[in-house]
Image (tube, rainbow, N blue to C red):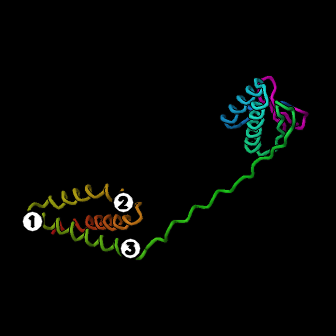
Amino acid sequence: MRLHVEADHPVLTGDDGTGPRAVDPATLPLDRDLVTALTEWARVARAVDGEDAGALVTRRGLQLAARLATAMNHPIDYVDPITGGTTPVRPAPRQARPAPAPTGEPTPWLTGLTLSAFLAAITVVAVVALAITLHDTNPVLPLVSNLVVTAGLLPSIWLARRTPTWRWVSYGVATGIALSWLVLPFVLFS
């Protein structure tokens, strides 16, 4: 395939098996930004006079030819609109996706789970003690207190669940609240 300029338009010519054929890059399934850049380059190439500007057009044309070759995964012969010389351009090699970066340190499972268990126990004791105390005043208050405690802690638990150290605290408090809801029927019906 060859990339060249005809009448202010970029053109790709090549043999498709039936003979030489010219194609406008805008008709190909290419990135719109690449097609726009090729069109602007072709217009500038026809309007330019002078060596300095010609060198810029040549350099830009080579860059666009490299992008086009990579997008089509096919080598392209770049025909310089200023000098008429031809330069072969190969597609850039496809790069494999990089492996995910390793985390900075290992996960402290033993310490984290110990902290979570400790905080779950403290949370269950605190919420159930509150429910038992309020049950003596009014039998509906333990349910209300559990709702208030859950609604009050839920946003903090949700925000802390992805923070490296605080996630263990949020797991423990969430487990404690869940267990306190399981104990609540025993408090209400005792």
Q: Amino acid at mark 2?
A: Ala
Q: Please give the label number shown on residue 160.
A: 2
Q: Nearer the viewer, residue 101 or 27?
A: 101
Q: Residue, x 25% and y 56% (percent of image)?
A: 152
The answer to whether residue 127 is left or right of residue 92 is: left
The residue segment tinted magenta is 1-20
Q: Is 122 within the magenta?
A: no
Residue that carries the numbered disc 3 in the rendered image:
113
Sort mark 2 into few (<14), some (14-19) or many (20+) by Cα contacts within 10 Å. some
Sort mark 1 into few (<14), some (14-19) or many (20+) by Cα contacts within 10 Å. few
Locate the N terminus by quadrant: top right
Residue that carries the numbered disc 1 in the rendered image:
136
Residue 53 location (% of width, % of height): 75, 30
Which of discs 1 and 3 lies nearer the camera? The answer is: 3
Q: Nearer the viewer, residue 19 or 9?
A: 9
Locate residue 154: give its quadrant.
Answer: bottom left
* Mark 2 vs 1, N-terminal side: 1
Circle 2 SS class: helix
* Cα gap from disc 1 to disc 3, whole angstroms: 35 Å
Sort mark 3 into few (<14), some (14-19) or many (20+) by Cα contacts within 10 Å. some
Of all residues, the one furthest to the right in this rendering is 19
The secondary structure making up most of the magenta span is strand
Residue 23 in sight from this viewpoint? no
Q: Is 14 within the magenta?
A: yes
Locate the C terminus by quadrant: bottom left
Q: Amino acid at mark 1?
A: Asp
Circle 3 SS class: helix
Q: Residue, x 77% and y 28% (percent of image)?
A: 45
Residue 61 in sight from this viewpoint? yes
* Mark 1 vs 3, N-terminal side: 3
